Image (cartoon, coloured by chain):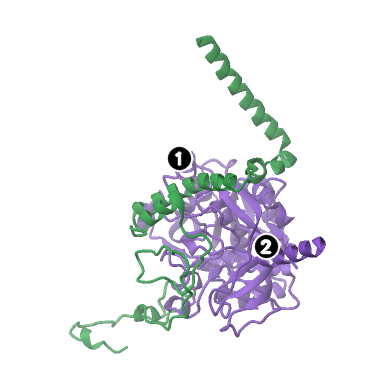
Amino acid sequence: MRNAICQTLKKHLKSTSMLAMNYRGPFRVRIDHKPMPEILHPEDAIVRVTRSCICGSDLHLYHGLVPDTRVGSTFGHEFIGVIEEIGSEVTEVKVGDHVLVPFNIACGKCAFCKQGLYGNCHESNPQATAVGGIYGYSHTAGGFDGGQAEYVRVPYANFGPTVIPPDMDPDDAVLLTDVLPTGYQAAEMGGIKPGDTVVVFGAGPVGIMAAKCSWLFGAGRVIVIDHIDYRLDFVRSYAHCEAYNFREIGDVVLFLKKITDWLGADVCIDAVGGDAAGNAMQTITGRKLLLQAGSATALHWAINGVKKGGIVSIVGVYGPTDNLVPIGNVVNKGLTIRANQASVKRLLPRLIEHVQAGRLNPKAIITHRVPLEEVADAYHIFSAKRDNCIKTVLLPSAK
Amino acid sequence: METPENLKHIEGWGIDADPNNEPTYPIKNYTGDDHKRINWERPSLQDQDVEILRSLERPNVTAVFGNTLPPSGISGRIRRFAFNYSESSYGHWLPLLLADRINMVEGIVDDIKKGHFPNIIKERGWPAEWKYNRSGVLKKAAAGALIFGIVMLSLRRRK
């Protein structure tokens, strides 16, 4: 009798709770039991997560840089999984489909979605108008729980989730939810012309992808700047580019001028965002004192390192307050600045084609596969860049 | 391109317009839809079963939203205050950052109330640091012990 009660209780607990990452404050996360997500809208789906990544932009949350990141949040906007349940109006996917879920939550109907600006949906984030909804990315991005969990609620399931082609490796698929599209769009926004010199700031996963994708747009020379040697070594061989450690080259802008015939790069890509190192004043005011929305060192270098009339493409994530950037030089040099969250759904058909054709091999950047239960260690390893970590995939065990 | 009725009095209106000169293309597939303002067919609306803070810069709550962590406690009060200001105001963002820090303390109190004493060492991933950067941990610990020793020694001498 006692056993039977225990079994029933266990079964009940299993169906009403799940394991999920739980944010407790800057640099503190843990795994916890949380209530199972529910269908809250007729276009919702519940997805059983099969893989979930830690993104470089999750570190901005982890470091406490993004306002309205509430204790108890579950992060994770890069995930794939199997559809377990669908709402009454869902027709485009069905239970059992293995789907990749773009990190942007987009309705597909508003004026911005109709124009392909799926990172700017106007029907997914009540808390802020500047950004659309993003899974597990604070209440500033809609307050949705993310995919670093066994299960996740996926709104607008008719529009966002895309069935993973049967011949595609799930490790490739999970990197199509954010990191590859973001790197690709960074290059696309650079408006690269054949022969252009492209400088990418940051050799993290997005920077690596931006460097790799720059060739697809016809770049003549690709240069990556970072300060982590193992990442520079990786990008050098993975993306066939030049790579320099900014701690060894002195004044970064001067160095770039010298190696580009004293003109500067045609295109500069900021793939770092608010966690940038390399300038003490920016680090102290942006990352330590939070007087800025993160450190704008990479953006500073991008603006000053691009040639006159050049293009600066920004995909690095900054907080919503202000940053110290040399805007006067943007005017004086006649620069074009292009920036956005990647419009994943728009880019997916082309990127799936590139992956299937072998032109892009995103899964090569995965260095760590970690059980979801070890999420705290995984975050620390990624944040502190231990064990040559480039990209971490979390593996939930729910079946 | 036909001149709109209300602009026909402006000589040369739109004469140099070039639809191909779209600096955001192909990032934005220009359709002119945004000129219809907020006039699209809205999706079904999610029920508001918890308090949702709404940006002052929009007229309504979006059709979907996250509902797992409504504002609560002292941090919740500060968040409500913050949403009295627009997204372009420090009055919005700085209180939110303050609320986040207070929320962290609330989280610890809440854990203890539930009989769970948070394992800060584990939550901060220090076991991984010990595994992959043992010498760094030992150096930091030695430096900390040295500073602590110097402070204690100077305090004793003052007495």
Question: Residue at image x 69%, y 72%?
Answer: A355
Label located before the other in sequence (2 or 1): 2
Q: Which residue is mark 2?
A: A18
Q: Say few, some or many: other residues with alpha carbon within 10 Å of mark 2 (under 14 / 14 to 19 / 20 or more).
A: some
The type of residue carrying mark 1 is Met
Tell which of A360 and A165 is nearer to you: A165
The type of residue carrying mark 2 is Met
In the image, residue B39 sits, relative to residue B54, either above or below, namely below
In the image, residue A122 sits, relative to residue A387, either above or below, namely below
Question: Residue at image x 68%, y 41%?
Answer: B126
- For chain B, give the colour: green
Q: Position of residue A134 (x, y in %)?
A: 53, 65
Chain letter of the residue beneath label 1 in the structure image: A
Residue A280 is left or right of residue B127, and the answer is left
Chain letter of the residue beneath label 2 in the structure image: A
View extreme (front): residue = A1
> Is label 2 or label 1 in front?
2
Q: Say few, some or many: other residues with alpha carbon within 10 Å of mark 1 (under 14 / 14 to 19 / 20 or more).
A: few
Q: Position of residue A148 (x, y in %)?
A: 64, 60
In the image, residue A151 sits, relative to residue A250, either above or below, namely below
Residue B107 is left or right of residue A336, and the answer is right
Q: CA distance from mark 2 to mark 1?
A: 43 Å
Q: Can I make out residue A315 in this image?
A: yes
Q: Position of residue A247 (x, y in %)?
A: 58, 41
Q: Which residue is mark 1?
A: A281
Q: Which chain is purple?
A: A
In the image, residue A125 sits, relative to residue A54, either above or below, namely below
